[in-house]
Amino acid sequence: MAEIIVALDFPTADRALDLVDDLGEAGTFYKVGLELYTRAGPSVVEELRDRGKSVFLDLKLHDIPNTVAGGVRAASQLGVDLLTVHTAGGGPMLDAAREVSGEMRLLGVTVLTSIAPTDLEATWGRKIPSMPEEVGRLADLAARHQIHGVVVSPLEAALIRSRVEPEFLIVTPGIRPAGVGRDDQQRVATPSAAVAAGADYLVVGRAITGANDPEAALHSILAEVDRVKSDDG
Ligand code: C5P
């Protein structure tokens, strides 16, 4: 059953928490990313937890195993529900993260949804077979190292779903309801397409936070997701 995670990409805790309060009961899960965490620190996570919300801390950790383990341990002690680590950090780093993750679930970042195939080829200095294959290779690495799931674009979700265990989490950013602009994202899909492709969580930022009426935007996305679920029977 897919859930919506609202990305709180704001420069201040006040603005972020105002949105959380505006969205009320309909907003259950929030993503705290680099900007907000760097400015507001752990207290914003505590504020969200005090409001009964689940928290996805999207720090995309990528460092030597010992350093990443320290960050993962700290996030777990803070009561975070989901935390990202880069799969490109490699097996030993993923193992070190997993050993100290406690109750918190870890998500492996594969290829950022802002990256187009040509950008990836330029970064890695080689031809890639296809984006889904590259993402699949990194998802397999995450699964082999007992990471709980991955962040992938909705366009790769179906392929990943077909090759991982059902409990392996698939989280998709790059969500754009029909008629909403792509911004800097390259690989985007509608909420219903992401759910149909097998996503467990949809991360939605600007389509809600940048809407004239964020509450209406969230309700409309929730209704779209519900329609896919009821079509599935
Ligand atoms: O505004 P938008 O819906 O594009 O925001 C997507 C959110 O998901 C951002 O907070 C971005 O950092 C995050 N994200 C992403 N691609 C990933 C992982 C996270 O866009 N691979």
Image: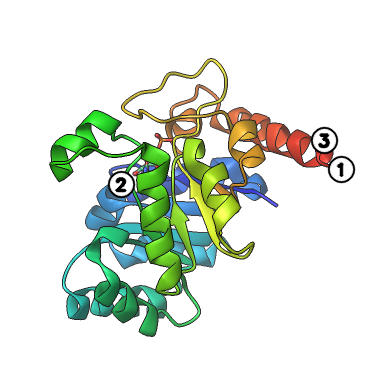
Q: Which residue is mark 2?
A: 12
Gap between marks 2 and 1 measured at Cα: 42 Å
- Give x and y (percent) for residue 70: 24, 79
Residue 169 lies, with reference to residue 204, above or below; the image says: below
Callout 2 environment at 10 Å: few (<14), some (14 to 19), or many (20+)?
Answer: some
**Position of the C terminus by quadrant:** top right
Sequence-wise first label, 2 or 1: 2
- Give x and y (percent) for residue 142: 40, 65
- Work out whether residue 185 can be spotted: yes
Q: Dot 1: what SS? A: loop
Sequence-wise first label, 2 or 3: 2
Amino acid type at mark 1: Gly
Specify whether 223 is left or right of 83: right
Res 146 → quadrant: bottom left
Residue 144 lies, with reference to residue 40, above or below; the image says: below
Amino acid type at mark 2: Thr
Specify whether 76 is left or right of 20: left
- Give x and y (percent) for residue 46: 43, 67
Residue depicted at x 57% and y 28%: 190
Q: Quadrant of ligand 1?
A: top left
User: What mark, if any, has residue 231 been given in the picture?
Assistant: 3
User: What mark, if any, has residue 233 been given in the picture?
Assistant: 1
Mark 2 in CB contact with mark 3 (< 8 angstroms): no
Q: Dot 3: what SS? A: helix
Q: Nearer the viewer, residue 91 or 205?
A: 91
Q: Nearer the viewer, residue 40 or 195?
A: 195
Residue furthest top as drawn: 179
Amino acid type at mark 3: Asp
- Give x and y (percent) for residue 153: 44, 40
